[in-house]
Image (cartoon, helix red, strand yellow):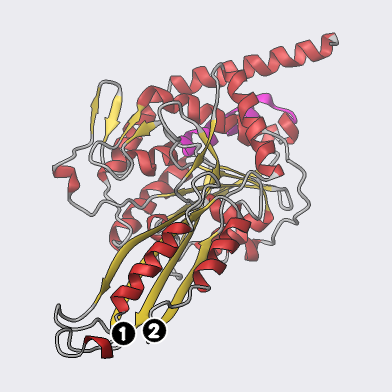
Amino acid sequence: MSAGSVSGQRAAADQAADLLRRLRGRQERMASLLERLARAESPSADREAQEWMLALLAAECEARGLAPRIYRRLGNPLLLAVPRQRRRCRPLQLLIGHCDTVWPVGPLQGMPVERRDGHLYGPGVFDMKGGLVQMLFALDAAFEVVREAGGDGAGGDGARGELAVTPVLLVSSDEEVGSRSSKRSIVRLARYADRVFVAEPALGRRGRLKTARKGIGRFVVSIEGRAAHAGLAPRSGASAILELSHVVQSLHAMNDPDGGTTVNVGKIDGGLSPNVVAPRARCEVDVRVLTVEAGRRVETAIHGLRPTVEGTHLHVEGRVRLPPMERTPGNRRLWKMAKEEAAALGFELHQATAGGASDGNLTSPLAPTLDGLGAVGDGAHAAHENVVLDRMPERAALLARLLLAPPLGRSAPAPSPGEQYDD
C-alpha cells in the first residue's frame, strides 16, 4: 500500500471520527426535536394534524439551508425539500420518510412522551419520527463537512456547501395506509435517483439495516352458493361455506415458509342463518413474498382456484400490489458501502429481511435502495414504542457519510425542475 493510500485512509478515518463526535454533541438537540415531533400527533387520516406536522418539518428544513415545499393536491399532503443552493443536472439522492403514525389523536394521555433509562417513549417516536430527526441532522452535518473542506469534497462544491449528489428530501403523510397519495411522487423521483435512502426504523436492538423486504398481496375470494332450508331440503342447496372451507385449505397449502411465501386467510364471513344452507361466503387473504417470481406464482395459483362443491361459483379479486424489495446488485452495492462507512465510524453493521413493507418496496425496482436507516428502538405500533437516544447520533453519522459518497454512476437523466417537483 502506498504512502498516499495510507494517508488518505487516515484522513477518512479522522473525518468519520470528527463527524461522529460532532453529532454526539448534538444528541440533546436531537432528543428535544423528537419530543416536539412526537407531541405533535399526526395520524394518517387527520389532514389538519398532517399540515401542522409538515409545517414544523418545513421550518426545520429551512433552518438547514433547504427550500421546502408542501404539496396538497393529491390527497394527503407531502413535503419536498432541496438545497437552496444547488447546481442543475447533478445526480439526485432521494431521502424518504413519513410523518404519519398509526396512533389517533389522544394517546399522549396514556403513553406520554417521556425519557426513561436512556430511551425516549411516545407515539410515533420509533416509527418513524426518530428517523426524520436523524435525516435532518445527517443533512446538516453533511453540508458542514463539504463547506469546511472548502474544495471538492467527494466531487462536491465546498464553497457552495453543495454535495456531489443533490439530496432530495421527501416526507409523506400516508405511508401507514399504503402511500396512496404519495406513491406517484415517490416513483417519479426514484426513476431519476442515483440512490435512495429510507429512514424507516432499524430492525431489532442491533440496528440492522433492511436490505430486503417482502412484497404484499391482498385478495378477496367470494363464493356464491344456493340457499335452501337446512332441515326440509338440504340437498337442494349448495353451501358456500362448505366451499369456503375447501378454499381456505387450498390457500393454506400455498404457504412456503422455506421460500419466504406466506398466505394468510385473515378474515371470513358468510351465511344467513343457522337453518339456511349458506348462499354466500367470502374470505380476505394477505400474501407476502420475497421475490417477484414467487409473487407471480401465488397470484396465478389464487386466481386459478376452482370450486369443488357442486352448484357453487368462485370469484377472485386482488393481486400482489406492492413488489418485494429484493437484494438487487445496486442494493447490495449500497449495503457494502454502508457496512464500510459504519466500520469507519467504529461500529459493526448487520443486515436483515423485513416481513413488512415500506416505500423502499416502491423505489427498489427503480434505483439502488437502502432501508432501515432510521432509529434503533422497539415497539412499533405498540404502547411501549421507544427509541434508544444514544444510538441516534451514530445513525445520523452513518447517513451523513452515505450522503457524502460520490455518485454510483447510474445513467438515469436528471429531471427538469417541472418534472422533479410537480405533484
Q: Is residue 347 visible?
A: yes
Q: Nearer the viewer, residue 167 or 340?
A: 340
Magenta-colored stretch includes residue 281: no
Residue 300 is situated, as x and y percent measured from the top left of the image, at 56, 68
Q: Residue at x 45, y 76 (%)?
A: 316
Q: Residue at x 83, y 8 (%)?
A: 3
Q: For the magenta stretch, what is the residue range? A: 134-152
Residue 40 is situated, as x and y percent measured from the top left of the image, at 27, 47
Q: Nearer the viewer, residue 309 or 386?
A: 309
Q: Which residue is mark 1?
A: 238
Quadrant of res 334:
top right
Q: Is residue 160 visible?
A: no
Checking the image for residue 40, the label placed there is: none
Query: Would residue 369 be found to the left or right of residue 97 on screen?
Result: right
Q: Residue at x 42, y 80 (%)?
A: 314
Name the kind of residue labelled 1 in the image.
Answer: Ala
Type of secondary structure dominating the magenta stretch:
helix
Q: Which one is earlier in the sequence, the residue at label 2 or at label 1?
A: 1
Image marks 2 and 1: residues in contact by CB distance under 8 Å: yes
From the viewer's perspective, is residue 381 above or below residue 286? above
Residue 85 is situated, as x and y percent measured from the top left of the image, at 63, 45
Residue 59 is situated, as x and y percent measured from the top left of the image, at 41, 46
The local crowd at label 1, few if under 14, some if 14 to 19, many if 20 or more residues have their Cα within 10 Å, is: many
Q: Which residue is mark 2?
A: 310
Q: Residue at x 54, y 18 (%)?
A: 347
Q: Quadrant of the N terminus?
A: top right
The local crowd at label 2, few if under 14, some if 14 to 19, many if 20 or more residues have their Cα within 10 Å, is: few
Name the kind of residue labelled 2 in the image.
Answer: Glu
Per the model, the C-alpha gap separating discs 2 and 1 is 7 Å
